[in-house]
Amino acid sequence: MTAKLIDGAALARSIRQQCAARAKTLTEAGRQPGLAVVLVGDSPASAVYVRHKINDCKEAGIRSVLDHLPADTTEQALLARVRELNEDPSIDGILVQLPLPKQISEQRVIATIAAHKDVDGFHVANAGALMTGATGFRPCTPYGVMKLLESAGVPLAGAEAVVVGRSNIVGKPQAMLLLQSDATVTICHSRTRNLAEHTRRADVLVAAVGRAKMITADMVKPGATIIDVGMNRDENGKLCGDVDFESVAAVAGAITPVPGGVGPMTRAMLLVNTLEAAERASAGGT
Ligand code: GUN
């Protein structure tokens, strides 16, 4: 391996510590930050994610409220719960864990969350704010990736950045954030022709596809910075990213591991967004 390892676990730890200090200041001023996490149904993966988020809050001194609703919850009931949380002054952030059961429209649920409490940054008002450069919440994963790039000292102005994946949660907001940092951005996806021709031009390559080890060494420019957002299982059931780490690390300049790269940063940025919401609310704004 020649690439420098970008340690997301370490950076996330220091961000969590900063968050704990900010939470303490708010709490001492009589206003402990609060996050509501809503989980619908019994997906084991979602349960794990939610448990981590609740634990992170506890460690940082953020009050969290977990609403675990049954899998057959109606959309109407969930929307009613979200509206209650919107009105609750002790709640600064609301996170509804996705995916939701199929009888519920994710889009309507996200649209119902008050934009100033949407710490996931999924509401159209926050997506629009990101697009136009206005103040708003940035989705946690791409926001965390930007912090990783910054910590690794990766120059972005004028750089070729290629994002593989076009989801609303990662690919699209990632591209906007890279653009804001003056990179020249290409978004590739499942219908892209000659994917490797694009990825080989990348100074910064962000892989967010959800397919195990699909980015191989021949698709990477020597010296490039590789950010792996993937979280998959390989043929032996071992956790792996979208990047074939062993081979790519031999050509890349810097690379994030899976686990220990983007994952812990996503969780840390949720705390950052929650504190941002709490500080704004505490300052009297929304
Ligand atoms: N499901 C997978 N990732 C996320 C996320 O970042 N936020 C929410 N609410 N659900 C998710």
Image (tube, helix red, strand yellow):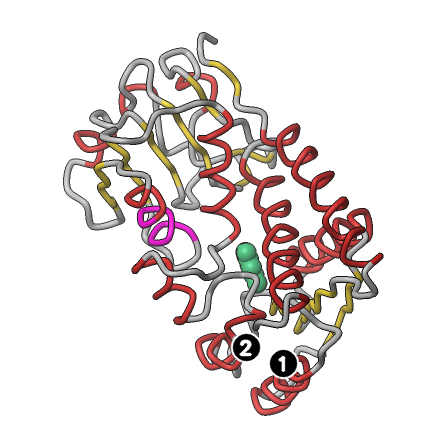
The x, y position of residue 76, in whole percent, is: 58, 91
User: Tag count in the figure?
Assistant: 2
Q: Is residue 50 left or right of residue 106?
A: right
The x, y position of residue 79, in whole percent, is: 58, 86
Q: Is residue 196 left or right of residue 238?
A: left
Q: Amino acid at mark 2?
A: Ile
Measure the alpha-carbon separation of dots 2 and 1: 7 Å
The x, y position of residue 240, in whole percent, is: 54, 33
Q: Within the image, what quadrant is residue 268 found in?
A: top right
Q: Could you say whether the residue bearing mark 1 is in a helix, strand or loop?
A: helix
Is the Cβ of the residue at disc 2 closer than 8 Å to that at disc 1? yes
Q: Which residue is mark 2?
A: 113
Q: Is 235 or 211 nearer to us in this picture?
A: 211
Quadrant placement of the C terminus = bottom right
Q: Within the image, what quadrant is residue 179 found in?
A: top left
Start-end of magenta stretch: 170-176
Q: Which residue is mark 1?
A: 86
Q: Earlier in the sequence, mark 2 or mark 1?
A: 1
Q: Could you say whether the residue bearing mark 2 is in a helix, strand or loop?
A: loop
Q: Is residue 23 left or right of residue 81?
A: right
Q: Is mark 1 within 8 Å of ligand 1?
A: no
Few, some or many residues within 10 Å of mark 1 (<14, 14–19, 20+): many
Taking the image as four quarters, which one is ligand 1 found in?
Answer: bottom right
Q: Is 31 or 9 nearer to us in this picture?
A: 31
Residue drawn at point x = 70 percent, y = 54 percent: 53
Classified by dominant secondary structure, the portion drawn in magenta counts as helix
Q: Is mark 2 within 8 Å of ligand 1?
A: no
The x, y position of residue 239, in whole percent, is: 59, 35
Residue drawn at point x = 76 percent, y = 57 percent: 26
Q: Is 240 above or below relative to 249?
A: below
